[in-house]
Image (tube, grey):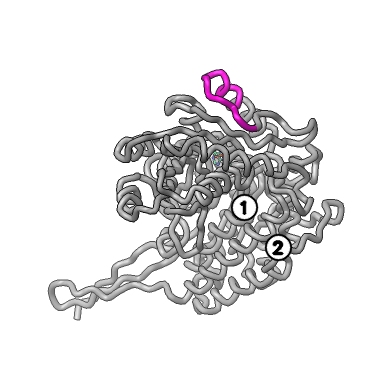
């Protein structure tokens, strides 16, 4: 799938803006709508139905009905997989339009939507489509004259709440395993970026995924999101977002004891030893932080470089950053678009301010770009200390902190000195150091001499406050199943 940049914002048609419940497009029961904003222009793109508890209730009932009585769970698993392949094919056929819609709503460069997000999302659906007919239990030799076996059954109705940084990709990560397992879905997309998830629901309908299997309720977190979390007909919550929201979800789901999987934030260390290929490491640090406007939960936001290579590394990193094209996300040469909204924009600028006040050296960027749209310069802080807020807090923007180290044991301890544990990377030619780092750093993903390598087959998720459970791979699928033990007297 190669790049074709063909859409201009004015050509993009917005066709889905309502709640998708039981296979129908319906307005919110309250009649309310909210604006979704183009972050490059700060202008409204469309009004979208503002779902709340009443709409979630209708969606949960539709999903429950489809789960209990619909054909999804009981159809031949291979046919379920076939429908998922059709959805992936349909997305591929519409790849340019979906990418343009994603860019319009989120602000990420069109070439990233088209060449990264969409291909990964399609690949994820195909990966899980192939799993649909390969979900099975085992036979177990227990004591006595019994035949014992397990069944892997779908968990039921899955409530899925996603953020705005990768709207299509997060939709695919959530739908893929749920659909393969035979679950039905109530999804709440992020209020900043509802459009592509809604469009995917329409494509799912058109390829023949039965009514009620996928339901989408756009709206806000404390209303629509909380209603999903509390609904008694929903069995599981899969959530991606902030750890503080996950804490609220944990409390709100206590009464119904939902199964929970959380993929949360990070403050991921990216550690460069003196023996590393420094060009590759500089590129890894650059991409690992600035990808997606810095709005990645696994962003390598603490870059530790061995002191002896500090100056050389900074030179390479600054050279890369100086060339970075920030601007219109629809322009073919743009590498960085706007931040997603005013709130993120303000938060990032306030962290840049804090970094300066706390005494770190802002050696690149540090300012807004232009006076319209939420654009921020790629920013590098040097001489950062571990206790500065830019080194401890998740900024979720294009702000890279460089720290130095001299000792392996010390750097492993400092890499671990965070309550997050989503990802970490190490750059070295010494295989022993790489393995030791991989074993001792407490994070769900360790990259060695690379960064941001994702694959639908490789589990992803966090240690510590970065979440629990894993998405992708077989583990991601199992999170949508219940294990049932059947014992028969012989
Ligand atoms: P972010 O800062 O990335 O927006 P959030 O955790 O606030 O992270 O949002 C991620 C998703 O969680 C969004 O879809 C949002 O609407 C939803 N959300 C926010 N608050 C709640 C809540 N109290 N209950 C359920 N979902 C919520």
- Tag 1's secondary structure? helix
Disc 1 crowd rating (10 Å Cα; few below 14, some 14-19, many 20+) is some
Point out the residue furthest to the bottom here.
490
Q: Position of residue 157 (x, y in %)?
A: 50, 58
The magenta segment is: 352-364
Name the residue beneath numbered marker 2: 202
Which of 104 and 418 lies nearest the eye of the viewer? 418
Q: Position of residue 81 (x, y in %)?
A: 54, 74
Residue 245 at least partly seen: yes
User: Residue visible at 13% across and 72% down?
Assistant: 143
Q: In which quarter of the view is residue 485 placed?
A: bottom left
Name the residue beneath numbered marker 1: 58
Residue 32 at least partly seen: no
Q: Position of residue 196 (x, y in %)?
A: 69, 55
- Tag 2's secondary structure? helix
Which of 404 and 299 lies nearest the eye of the viewer? 404
Q: Position of residue 247 (x, y in %)?
A: 45, 37
Whether residue 353 appears in magenta in the rendering, the answer is yes
Q: In which quarter of the view is residue 458 placed?
A: bottom left
User: Residue visible at 57% across and 45% down?
Assistant: 286
């Amino acid at each position: 799938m190669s790049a074709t940049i063909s859409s201009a914002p004015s050509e993009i048609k917005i066709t889905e803006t309502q709640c998708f419940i039981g296979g129908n497009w319906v307005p919110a029961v309250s009649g309310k709508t909210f604006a979704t904003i183009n972050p490059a222009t700060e202008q409204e793109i469309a009004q979208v139905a503002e779902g709340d508890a009443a709409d979630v209730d209708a969606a949960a009932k539709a999903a429950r009905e489809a789960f209990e009585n619909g054909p999804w769970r009981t159809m031949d698993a291979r046919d379920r997989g076939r429908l998922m392949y059709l959805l992936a094919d349909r997305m591929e056929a519409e790849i340019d339009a979906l990418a343009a819609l994603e860019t319009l709503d989120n602000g990420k460069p069109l070439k990233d939507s088209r060449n990264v997000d969409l291909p990964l999302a399609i690949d994820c659906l195909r990966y899980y489509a192939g799993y649909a007919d390969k979900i099975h239990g085992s036979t177990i030799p227990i004591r006595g004259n019994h035949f014992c076996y397990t069944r892997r059954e779908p968990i039921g109705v899955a409530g899925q709440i996603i953020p705005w940084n990768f709207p299509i990709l997060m939709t695919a990560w959530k739908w893929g395993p749920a659909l393969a397992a035979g679950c039905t879905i109530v999804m709440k997309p992020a209020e900043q970026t509802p459009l592509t998830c809604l469009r995917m629901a329409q494509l799912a309908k058109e390829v023949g995924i039965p009514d009620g299997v996928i339901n989408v309720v756009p709206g806000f977190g404390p209303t629509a999101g909380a209603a999903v979390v509390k609904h008694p007909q929903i069995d599981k919550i899969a959530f991606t977002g902030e750890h503080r929201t996950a804490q609220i979800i944990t409390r709100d789901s206590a009464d119904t004891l939902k199964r929970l999987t959380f993929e949360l934030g990070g403050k991921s260390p990216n550690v460069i030893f003196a023996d590393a290929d420094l060009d590759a490491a500089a590129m890894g640090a650059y991409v690992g932080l600035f990808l997606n406007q810095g709005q990645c939960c696994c962003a390598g936001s603490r870059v530790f470089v061995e002191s002896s290579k500090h100056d050389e590394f900074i030179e390479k990193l600054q050279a890369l950053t100086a060339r970075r094209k920030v601007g219109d996300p629809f322009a073919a040469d743009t590498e960085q678009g706007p931040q997603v909204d005013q709130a993120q924009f303000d938060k990032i600028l306030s962290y840049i301010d804090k970094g300066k006040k706390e005494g770190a050296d802002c050696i690149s960027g540090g300012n807004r770009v232009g006076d319209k749209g939420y654009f921020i310069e790629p920013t590098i802080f040097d001489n950062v200390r571990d206790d500065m807020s830019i080194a401890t807090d998740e900024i979720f923007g294009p702000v890279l902190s460089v720290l130095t180290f001299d000792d392996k044991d010390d750097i492993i301890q400092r890499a671990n000195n965070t309550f997050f544990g989503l990802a970490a990377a190490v750059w070295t030619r010494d295989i022993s150091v790489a393995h030791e780092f991989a074993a001792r750093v407490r994070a769900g993903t360790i990259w060695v001499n690379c960064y941001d390598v994702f694959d639908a087959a490789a589990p992803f998720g966090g240690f510590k406050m970065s979440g629990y459970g894993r998405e992708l791979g077989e583990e991601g699928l199992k999170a949508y199943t219940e294990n049932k033990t059947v014992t028969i007297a012989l």
